[in-house]
Image (cartoon, rainbow, N blue to C red):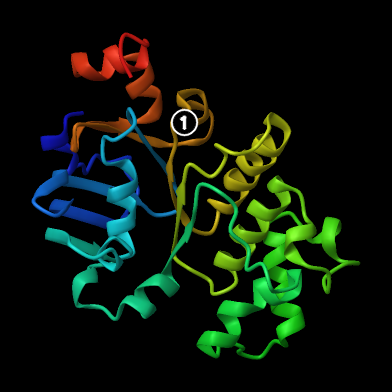
Amino acid sequence: MSSADSGGFRSALAPTPILETKDLSAGYGSGDAIKNVCIQFYDRKITAIIGPSGCGKSTLIRCLNRMHEEIPGTTVEGGAALAGKDIFQMDPVLLRRQVGMVFQRPNPFPSMTIFQNVAAGLVLNGLRGDKSLEELVEESLRQAALWDEVKVKLRSPATDLSGGQQQRLCIARALAVQPKVLLLDEPCSALDPIATAKIEELLMELKKNLTIVIVTHNMQQAARVSDFTGFMLLGELVEFGPTDTMFTNPQDSRTQGYITGRFG
């Protein structure tokens, strides 16, 4: 499926899009990092964004929770909507509560304990409901498949954890505020194979309850975990469709060239 087709993808078997862009362009200074991207992210599915370095993958997902705008001199044009609401008309803080993000390298708050890291968003946003802070932190750590490993050391510094544990802690921190969408920017690139496998298993479990978008340079990872895949090149969405189709029968010769290793 080509970029031109992706914006209107509505087969009878397709799930409901919860997040989508329309002719979205964004750049730094006078240059565009992404150009006229139309893509839909489906409810409780995993979408992988693949492509060579510098093709605009990270810029795209940073636009989805408006972090791109935090960099001085950046530009954004076009549209994006979350559950039908224009994200550029939303309060960025409220948007990021619904569209969480996990970065390439684990970034726990270094001066905080494990408990405080997970609780930070809950405290900042005043999100408690009927549950205690302790219950919510435990729930988030369980969701991130980390509770059993840290339950006896919640008051220890988060930086005492291994790299893979720190990344799952960052996922728990993002999950604590109950987002609708979780964005992950190459979350396993700094991890060893064992930690990577744990993250992938976690993502498969998490998609039962939320939408996941993962930027990855690892095509095998995209094939393993994603339901849909978008291939980007030189800032453009070249092709988008079900992952099985993308990897076995790509429609664009550039997609085929990248997937077969002829470039990238």
Q: Which one is in front, 184 or 74?
A: 74
Which residue lies at the image location 60% right of the left edge and 89% below the top edge?
129
Q: Which one is in front, 161 or 141?
A: 161
- The C terminus appears in which quarter of the rendering? top left
Residue 147 drawn above or below residue 24: below
Which residue was labeled with disc 1? Answer: 222
Image coordinates of residue 62 in percent, x first then y, are 33, 56
Which residue lies at the image location 28% right of the left edge and 63% below the top edge?
71
In the image, farthest residue toward the right = 152
The amino acid type of the residue labelled 1 equals Ala
Q: Quadrant of residue 75?
A: bottom left
**Number of numbered discs:** 1
Which residue lies at the image location 61% right of the left edge and 78% below the top edge?
120
Q: Residues within 10 Å of mark 1 (few under 14, many from 20)?
A: many
Q: Quadrant of residue 130?
A: bottom right
Q: Is residue 102 left or right of residue 152?
A: left
Image coordinates of residue 188 in percent, x first then y, are 57, 39
Numbered disc 1: secondary structure:
helix
Residue 249 drawn above or below residue 66: above
- The N terminus appears in which quarter of the rendering? top left
Q: Is residue 189 left or right of residue 238?
A: right
Which residue lies at the image location 56% right of the left edge and 78% below the top edge?
121
Image coordinates of residue 251 in percent, x first then y, are 21, 18
Q: Quadrant of residue 139?
A: bottom right
